[in-house]
Image (cartoon, rainbow, N blue to C red):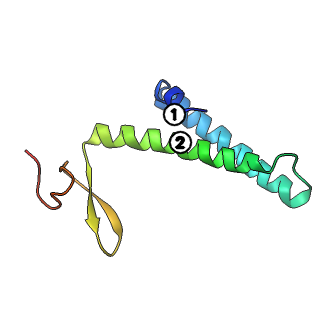
């Protein structure tokens, strides 16, 4: 699955596909504990696909809400209310 293909899908389609992938990952992990799996690399591919979908959904969410990330030393990055340009942390862009 390529990110280009994901960008063409709607949020509802992405969420449905995300649920399917998470279900497949759960089943594959359960199968691994019980018996041998034919292709153990499939777990990695499923996790990467899940991450791609979450990235697309999050980028759409950020664009729709117009939020930015302000660096917070104790928490890493925290979400704030206005968009700022990189390097001008703490000041609002006009």
Label ID, residue 43: none
Which residue does the image show at 15% across and 61% down from the upper left? 90
Which residue does the image show at 67% across and 38% down from the upper left? 20
Most distant residue in the bottom direction: 74
The residue that mark 2 highlights is: 52
The residue that mark 1 highlights is: 3
Count of numbered labels shown in the rendering: 2
Find numbered disc 2 in the image and state the secondary structure of the residue it sits on: helix
Q: Is residue 88 left or right of residue 56?
A: left
Find numbered disc 1 in the image and state the secondary structure of the residue it sits on: helix
Between marks 1 and 2, how big is the CA–CA gap?
7 Å
Quadrant containing the C terminus is top left
Q: Where is residue 51? Give x, y as percent.
A: 55, 47
* Mark 1 or mark 2, earlier in chain: 1
Q: Where is residue 74? Give x, y as percent.
A: 33, 75
Q: Where is residue 79? Give x, y as percent.
A: 29, 57
Q: Where is residue 92? Give x, y as percent.
A: 11, 53
Which residue does the image show at 31% across and 62% down from the upper left? 78
Circles 1 and 2 in contact, beta carbons < 8 Å: yes
Query: Considering depth in this image, is 36 or 80 the residue closer to the camera?
Result: 36
Crowd class of label 2 (few under 14; some 14 to 19; many from 20; radius 10 Å): some
């Amino acid at each position: 699955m390529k990110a280009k293909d994901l960008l063409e899908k709607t949020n509802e389609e992405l969420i449905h596909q995300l649920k399917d992938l998470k279900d497949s990952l759960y089943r594959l992990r359960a199968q691994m504990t019980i018996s041998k799996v034919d292709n153990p690399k499939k777990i990695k591919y499923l996790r990467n696909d899940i991450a791609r979908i979450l990235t697309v959904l999050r980028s759409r969410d950020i664009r729709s809400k117009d939020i930015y990330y302000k660096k917070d030393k104790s928490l890493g990055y925290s979400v704030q209310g206005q968009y700022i340009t990189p390097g001008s942390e703490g000041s609002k862009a006009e």
